[in-house]
Amino acid sequence: MNTDFKGHPLPIEGLNSPKLRAAYDYWRERCGTRAMPSRDDIRPEDMVGLLGNAMLVDVTYDPPDLRYRLFGSDIANAHGADFTGRSVKDLEPEGFNDLIWRQYMEVVASREPRVHKVIYQTETKASNYERITLPLSSDGKRVDMLLAVSEYEKRFWQDVEQDAAAASVKSASGW
């Protein structure tokens, strides 16, 4: 199977997505004078326009795991599955889960927000999206949860076979 997963960091200063910018600004506001807000500082009613694109990820250390506490409905629709209650290691296909794990762990280690561009390509699916991952801490020192918000380009997942068939019909009809 031909798969390709790429991810690269983007500068926070250059956030173009209104959703990602709103998530970052909200997180900064909730920090106050602290390095990171806690989960208790985050109110769903303040994030109504972002909830479908939001994920909450529990961070455990012994053993290390990243488990989705919340997997937004738009994200679940894009993936074709709701990963609430499941580990990042359960994401499919193999390799994609490793990429997301590494990106989330960058935030855990640095204790600072990160923005990533993710490119997902298999033989049948393709997607490009940007995600901001924001650390949360109940004690102000150790990251125990992540708030992530993703925004997909144009549409969630492109069905490569359907797109190829549509292009063929378009070409044959002279469009």
Image: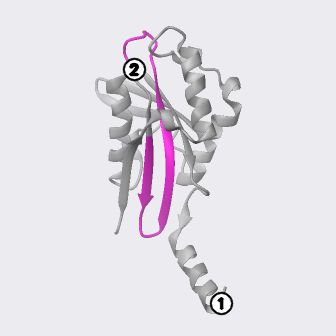
Residue 165 vs residue 24, the one in the foreground: 24
Task: Find the residue positioned furthest to the front.
Answer: 14
Which quarter of the figure is the N terminus placed in?
A: bottom left
Instruction: Give the amino acid type for the residue marked by disc 2 in the picture.
Output: Val
Circle 1 SS class: loop
Q: Is residue 139 magenta?
A: yes
Q: Mark 1 or mark 2: which comes first in sequence?
A: 2
Q: Is residue 140 above or below residue 114?
A: above
Mark 1, mark 2: which one is toward the viewer? 1
Residue 10 screen position, x and y as percent: 43, 41
Q: Is residue 32 above or below residue 66?
A: above
Residue 86 screen position, x and y as percent: 45, 39
Residue 169 screen position, x and y as percent: 62, 86
Q: Which residues are magenta?
A: 116-142
Q: Is residue 67 magenta?
A: no
Circle 2 SS class: loop
Residue 26 screen position, x and y as percent: 60, 23
Instruction: Give the amino acid type for the residue marked by disc 1 in the picture.
Output: Gly
Q: Which residue is mark 1?
A: 174
- How many numbered tags mark residues here? 2
Q: Which residue is mark 2?
A: 143
Q: Quarter-wise, where is residue 48 in the image?
A: top right
Task: Give the Cα separation between the discs numbered 1 and 2.
Answer: 56 Å
Residue drawn at the location 38% of the way across and 22% of the way down: 111
Residue 167 vs residue 137, the one in the foreground: 167
Residue drawn at the location 44% of the way across and 49% of the way down: 118
Task: Find the residue positioned furthest to the left.
Answer: 63
Q: Is residue 18 above or below residue 93?
A: above
